[in-house]
Image (cartoon, rainbow, N blue to C red):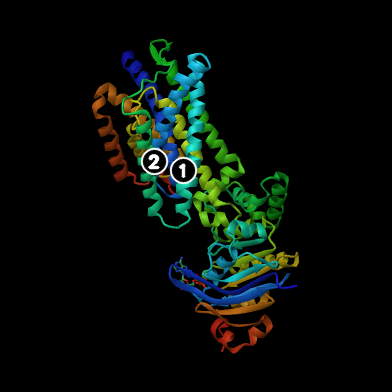
Amino acid sequence: MGALLAVEGLELAYGDVAACRDISFEVAAGEIVTLIGANGAGKSTTLRGVAGAMRPRRGRILFRGEDVTRMRSHERLLAGIALVPEGRRVFPFLSVRENLEMGGFRHRGDKAKVNALIERMMDTFPRLRERAGQRAGTLSGGEQQMLALSRALMSEPVLLCLDEPSLGLAPIIVQEIFRSIVAINRAGTSVLLVEQNARYALETAHRGYVMQTGTIIAHDTCAALKQDERVKEAYLGRK
Amino acid sequence: MTDLLLLFTQQTINGIYLGCLYVLVALGLTLIYGVMNQINFAHADFVTVGAFAAFFVATRWATKWLGLPDTTGYLLSIVAALGAGALLGLVVNAAVFAPLRNRGDELRPLIATIGVSVLLENGQLALFGPIPFQFDSPFAQHTIRLGRIFFSQQSVLVVIVAALAIGGLYAFMKFTFLGKALRAVSQDRETAGLMGINENFLIALTIVIASALAGMAGALLGPVIVLTPFAGASVIVKAFAIVIIGGFGNMEGTIIAGILVGIIEAFTVQYLGSGVIDLVVFVLLLVMLVVRPTGLIAERREENV
Ligand SMILES: Nc1ncnc2c1ncn2[C@@H]1O[C@H](COP(=O)(O)OP(=O)(O)OP(=O)(O)O)[C@@H](O)[C@H]1O
Ligand SMILES: [Mg+2]
């Protein structure tokens, strides 16, 4: 039995310029794996490649043993991969509720299920219930992040990919978001987490990969990475 | 004084009727722009195809062959034109737009719409020739009188059909999963894909809806325009102006702008003569571009569809 997600020699490019080269990593079932690295290292690009928003130039992506490399993003979602994109990307002119419905688009034939899922999301983040009819573009950053996370969960993913869920949020909200990530994982969803905030990421995840200028330069358990001199110096701000 | 009021009411009613025709044409342009960020230069020809489809159904197939009454024939022809437009949209998308779109280039699909336009115009020219067809609506002869205000049954029919189409479209966008997905695609296509929404399917659906509306508009316009293979051109320029005035890609703006342009046209004809209509519309367009470049409904300027 292989890993849930296995990325092998992935190369992704914008136009002719390669943003990621020879990326290989794995996520096992039930695991939280983090990708850390400086700005422009290629973390978001890698996640977009995993979720199918970008076609790889080279390499393979295996998900549950199946080759999904050539699948488009909507097919990958059906396969079980959901992405909370960088910058949240809520649909600004849809209401909060409609955004959630779009997250549950795959269940559109089953209204009762969609409504039950929406109820569950609103129980987790009561703020979303208060704002249900409001246009998502008018939400605060933290509320938008809760919405983006809930929207991704509406598809009941097997693997949840998160791109910088803490970006621009107050510490209290960051803690709330991370608590829910752990809870989601405990409930059986595997998580691939990209974070600027390496401290939080390494506290939350089981294993981590370190990216630098488009390649992976190190990987280990988070406990070990926290002790790694390069990681400490570059990302944890300690000497 | 009351005469003035009467005239005012009469021209407003005429204007609403005209505006409904324009809205049906302009909505398709707006929908396609909103969802795909693309201008469809073949839209006028979809109107023409609808007009010809309606012409043949109304004056030949339904009445001569099936022996239906004129009125039923014309009503049937509206449905037929809707279907013809939808079918044409489906085929053109599958054959031309979809393959080009997947190449990920913006200019090629745009130029392809011009190609489709040339193809449709010359195809119809070969089939129907350059001589205008006489397409009369049986409803145009019957006048309804309310006090001293007159309007034809045709104009009532046009307003009803347009209201049904606009209402149906609105309900679709607002209340169905697919309609909401369409709005999601127009707001953020990549993220919509990440939600499991097949954007290519929704783009195809958008084109089909837009073309169906254009075809139906053709059936309603047929009796009032000079029906030749180039007939669509006579309304498309105004439709483009309406789309811009309404704020590119904004459905509500397009509806309001369309009715507005219809009313302005009615009054222009009354006071200045029909020769200056286009001039007046484009002066309005220029004023709008200067005063309010984001369109009528500026507050929602970023909303597409
Ligand atoms: N849309 C784009 N077009 C062209 N180049 C891009 C695009 N998006 C990203 N890049 C380039 O690809 C490289 C990797 O970017 P990416 O967004 O994946 O980095 P990142 O690790 O997520 O950075 P950050 O921490 O700032 O989010 C960068 O050099 C960036 O300039
Ligand atoms: Mg990033």
Q: Nearer the viewer, residue A176 or A43?
A: A43
Query: Which image quadrant is residue B15 in?
Result: top left
Question: Mark 1 — residue?
Answer: B92
Which type of secondary structure does the marked residue at label 2 adopt?
loop
Picture coordinates of residue A225, whole percent (x, y): 64, 84
Mark 1, ligand 1, within 8 Å: the answer is no
**Chain letter of disc 1 in the image:** B
Q: In screen coordinates, is A58 left or right of B277?
A: right
Picture coordinates of residue B84, whole percent (x, y): 49, 32
- The lab-note entry on whether marks 1 and 2 share a chain reads yes
Q: Nearer the viewer, residue B278 or B69?
A: B69
Looking at the rendered image, the disc whose residue lies closer to the viewer, 1 or 2, is: 1
Q: Nearer the viewer, residue A205 or A26?
A: A26
Q: Nearer the viewer, residue B75 or A43?
A: B75
Question: Mark 2 — residue?
Answer: B42
Identify residue type, mark 2: Ala
Quadrant of the image for the N terminus of chain B?
A: top left
Picture coordinates of residue B20, whole percent (x, y): 42, 29
Q: Residues within 10 Å of mark 1 (few under 14, many from 20)?
A: some
Task: Tell me if residue B138 comes above or below residue B259 in the rendering.
Answer: above
> What's the residue at 55%, 86% (across, down)?
A233
Identify residue type, mark 1: Val
Q: Is residue A143 visible?
A: no
Which type of secondary structure does the marked residue at label 1 adopt?
helix
Q: In screen coordinates, is B79 left or right of B5?
A: right
Q: Earlier in the sequence, mark 1 or mark 2?
A: 2
Query: Which image quadrant is residue A177 in?
Result: bottom right
